[in-house]
Image (cartoon, grey):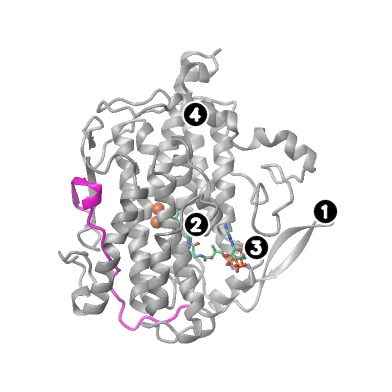
């Protein structure tokens, strides 16, 4: 195992050329992947040069390679973190046994299902974002979108490598299906809810990369603990890419907030929509939408699936080794409020069955930190009349114990009639989306220029100036 990535047709650090059958199988999957990318990847920009980073090594400085690339020529590859000698299963019923280098037979279908679910989200997000290049607020932002897109494509490769290597013909079939489902298509939808939701504009894109990519962070953290070693190592490398996706989202929203504040100060009596800005309450409604859709991605609060994943050593908690001492989780409970007969009843959920809730709760804390930083932008601009808030995990849920029970963003129960009457106050509405479309009709293509609703970033990419030509049109 080396940290350096080979220069083969499929770049890799897994010594792919030593396994000719696997190499051939992946080389056969490659044109199908490229077919999918050309059909469902960024529409209209396949022939343009984009200033992208490509991984050339899994070492900490492995991201040093920045250059112009046409997206279909991006070197999608297979990169695993180096193996740790003698690594043990870190939790569950097999704790302290040697980590598995092959799929444990009894857990085959469970493990395959986890990998397929993870893999399915990656192309789904590319599909959701495929038209956004046509309305980018700047070349800098357009480049960031494409960087995220090619890396999500690589995440698909990461999961397809596992399916092809370890799951035989069943795995190969699943790898094909990953290219056949389509985000939002009622006949062949993507597996998880949020990955079928439309993403029609850049505010939704920045919220998605803030909140939904952050679900990616937490799911990858828990799979990085897996006793199935190839999965753990794959996910650890994916996490390095995920950090950039969340940066794109968080900084994108921060720049929109900054711009809104500037417009509010320049014209204190004006509605910012008259000036082409995005009102703070509209930003909050988009936050509420993507944060709640993303809470659903953690699954039910009470989940026997999650208990099985933990018991079998396949999926741990985030930072399982670093943060916990009891890796069996056979004792103790998590308390949650469950709606029953019109009121909330406090229930004790045994730890293993509550694993989804534990991960969601860590995720929620991370969201709180992000929203605090967005509020600092308001503070720096001396805006005292508004603060952003993370909605309650009860709010707008379609999965788990709160599904079908209306709650306000602060967690207060509502009647069905109150929900209907106030929905447009809580969640991004058709009217909001129509307004956003009206201020995002075309891309801003002059280097260094930015759309009316967003402030420029403080610095460019990899030492390049903000007015660098990040995409050659
Ligand atoms: N939508 O026991 P339950 C990323 C299903 S994001 C639709 O409550 P479980 C990325 C569930 O499948 C990270 N269905 O949940 C981000 C089950 O179905 P069955 C993606 C849902 O199984 C941005 C039933 O409901 N990675 O990487 O413990 C851009 C009851 O399930 C949903 C992963 O998700 C939903 N939201 O947990 C690009 C990791 N939630 O059995 C990429 C792998 C639940 O009744 N996946 N269901 O047919 C998992 O670990 C688990 O499958 C889940 C669900 C956490 C998603
Ligand atoms: Fe991803
Ligand atoms: Fe991502």
**Mark 2: secondary structure:** loop
Please give the residue where the numbered disc 2 appears in the rendered image: 190
Q: Residues within 10 Å of mark 2 (few under 14, many from 20)?
A: many
Task: Note whether residue 390 is visible.
Answer: yes
Magenta-highlighted stretch: main secondary structure?
loop
Q: CA distance from mark 2 to mark 1?
A: 34 Å
62 or 298, which lies in front?
A: 298
Q: Which mark is residue 277?
A: none
Q: Are marks 2 and 4 in contact (CB under 8 Å)?
A: no
Q: Please state which of the two labelled residues, at mark 2 or mark 3, is closer to the viewer.
A: 2
Please give the residue where the numbered disc 4 appears in the rendered image: 436
In this rendering, would 49 be left or right of 150?
A: left
Please give the residue where the numbered disc 3 appears in the rendered image: 301
Question: Which of the marked residues, 2 or 1, is nearer the chain's N terminus?
Answer: 2
Residue 239 x, y percent position in the rendering: 37, 59
In the rendered view, tell whether residue 74 sits above or below residue 459. Answer: below
In the rendered view, tell whether residue 247 sits above or below residue 340. Answer: above
Q: Please state which of the two labelled residues, at mark 1 or mark 4, is closer to the viewer.
A: 4
Q: Please state which of the two labelled residues, at mark 2 or mark 1, is closer to the viewer.
A: 2
Q: Is residue 70 magenta?
A: yes
Please give the residue where the numbered disc 1 appears in the rendered image: 343
Look at the numbered disc 2 and say if its residue's Cβ is closer than 8 Å to ligand 1. Answer: no
- Which residues are the magenta region? 64-90
In the rendered view, tell whether residue 388 sits above or below residue 188. Answer: above
Residue beneath the point at 47% across and 30% down = 257
Look at the numbered disc 3 and say if its residue's Cβ is closer than 8 Å to ligand 1. Answer: yes
């Amino acid at each position: 195992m080396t940290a350096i990535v080979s220069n083969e047709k499929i770049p890799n650090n897994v010594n792919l050329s030593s396994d000719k059958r696997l190499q051939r199988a992946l080389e056969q999957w490659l044109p199908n992947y490229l077919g999918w990318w050309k059909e469902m990847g960024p529409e209209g920009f396949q022939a343009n040069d984009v200033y992208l980073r490509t991984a050339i090594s899994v070492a900490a400085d492995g991201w040093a390679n920045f250059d112009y690339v046409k997206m279909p020529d991006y070197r999608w590859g297979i990169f695993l973190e180096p193996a740790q000698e003698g690594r043990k299963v870190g939790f569950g019923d097999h704790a302290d046994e040697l980590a598995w280098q092959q799929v444990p037979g009894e857990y085959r279908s469970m493990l395959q299902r986890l990998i397929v679910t993870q893999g399915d989200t990656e192309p789904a997000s590319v599909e959701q974002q495929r038209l956004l290049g046509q309305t980018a607020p700047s070349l800098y932002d357009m480049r960031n979108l494409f960087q995220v897109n090619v890396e999500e494509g690589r995440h698909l490769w990461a999961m397809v490598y596992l399916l092809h290597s370890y799951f035989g013909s069943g795995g190969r079939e699943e790898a094909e299906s990953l290219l056949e489902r389509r985000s939002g298509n009622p006949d062949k939808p993507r597996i998880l809810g949020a990955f079928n939701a439309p993403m029609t504009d850049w505010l939704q894109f920045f919220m998605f990369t803030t909140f939904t990519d952050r679900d990616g962070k937490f799911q990858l953290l828990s799979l990085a603990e897996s006793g199935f070693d190839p999965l753990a190592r794959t996910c650890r490398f994916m996490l390095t890419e995920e950090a950039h996706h969340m940066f794109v989202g968080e900084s994108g929203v921060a720049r929109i907030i900054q711009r809104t504040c500037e417009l509010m100060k320049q014209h204190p009596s004006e509605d910012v929509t008259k000036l082409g800005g995005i009102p703070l309450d509209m930003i909050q409604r988009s936050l509420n939408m993507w944060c709640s859709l993303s809470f659903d991605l953690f699954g039910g609060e009470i989940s026997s699936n999650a208990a099985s994943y933990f018991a079998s050593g396949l999926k741990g908690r985030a930072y399982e080794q670093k943060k916990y001492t009891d890796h069996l989780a056979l004792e103790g409970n998590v308390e949650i409020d469950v709606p029953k007969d019109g009121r909330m009843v406090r229930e004790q959920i045994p730890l293993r069955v509550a694993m989804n809730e534990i991960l969601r709760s860590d995720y929620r804390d991370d969201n709180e930190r992000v929203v605090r930083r967005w509020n600092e932008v308001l503070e720096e601009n001396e805006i005292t009349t508004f603060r952003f808030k993370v909605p309650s995990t009860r709010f707008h849920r379609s999965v788990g114990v709160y599904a079908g029970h209306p709650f306000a963003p602060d967690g207060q129960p509502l009647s069905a009639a109150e929900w209907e009457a106030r929905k447009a106050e809580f969640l991004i509405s058709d009217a909001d989306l129509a307004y956003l479309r009206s201020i995002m009709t075309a891309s801003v293509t002059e280097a260094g220029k930015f759309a009316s609703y967003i402030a420029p970033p403080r610095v460019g990419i990899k030492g390049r100036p903000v007015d660098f030509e990040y995409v050659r049109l």
